[in-house]
Amino acid sequence: MALNTVCLWVDGDHVREGGAGGDMLLSEESNDTFVYQSLSDEVDSIRSFDAIADKLELRDLFNSLSYNGKTPVAERYLQFSVNSGTTFIQINADGAGSNSRFANLTQLMIFADTANL
């Protein structure tokens, strides 16, 4: 999927939404929050994501899926996959159900540590 031409420069302490389609989001400072509201927000690329200071906000996304649990990884709604230094955030629309599979929501580039997510 080709990325849209939207490019947001994020200063510190900002909330950013990529919106529908693929966007390139850049974090130059820390303490940035990247908000995802639905599966139509896929597939974004976030460059320079700081695993300690930056955040992914997925509450609205999970609400759109009618997910009301507390452990999305254990309930198979959320997983992380690392390939060639890029971390992929993946969503499964029905969790452990049989109707869907994991799909990429966003990719965190220039990022290597998933332990702090």
Image (cartoon, grey):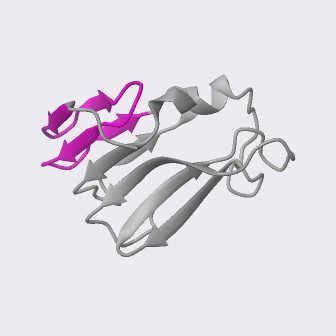
Residue 55 placed where, x, y %?
38, 46
Query: Does residue 109 belong to the magenta stretch?
Result: no
User: Would you place residue 10 above or below residue 28 in this image?
Assistant: above
Q: Nearer the viewer, residue 52 or 79?
A: 79
Query: Does residue 19 belong to the magenta stretch?
Result: yes
Q: How many circles with numbers are drawn on the protein?
A: 0
Q: Viewed as shown, does residue 37 lie left or right of 111?
A: right
Place residue 23 in its image quadrant: top left
Residue 60 placed where, x, y %?
56, 26
Q: Viewed as shown, does residue 67 lie left or right of 116?
A: right
Residue that lies at the very extreme toward the front in this rendered image: 1
Residue 109 placed where, x, y %?
30, 60
- Residue found 75% across the figure and 58% down from its top: 74
Residue 115 visible somewhere in the drawing: no
Magenta part of the protein: which range? 7-35
- Residue found 83% across the figure and 50% down from its top: 96
- Residue found 68% across the figure and 46% down from its top: 92
Residue 67 placed where, x, y %?
74, 33
Name the image quarter holding the N terminus. Answer: top left
Q: Nearer the viewer, residue 1 or 91?
A: 1
- Residue found 37% across the figure and 66% down from its top: 86
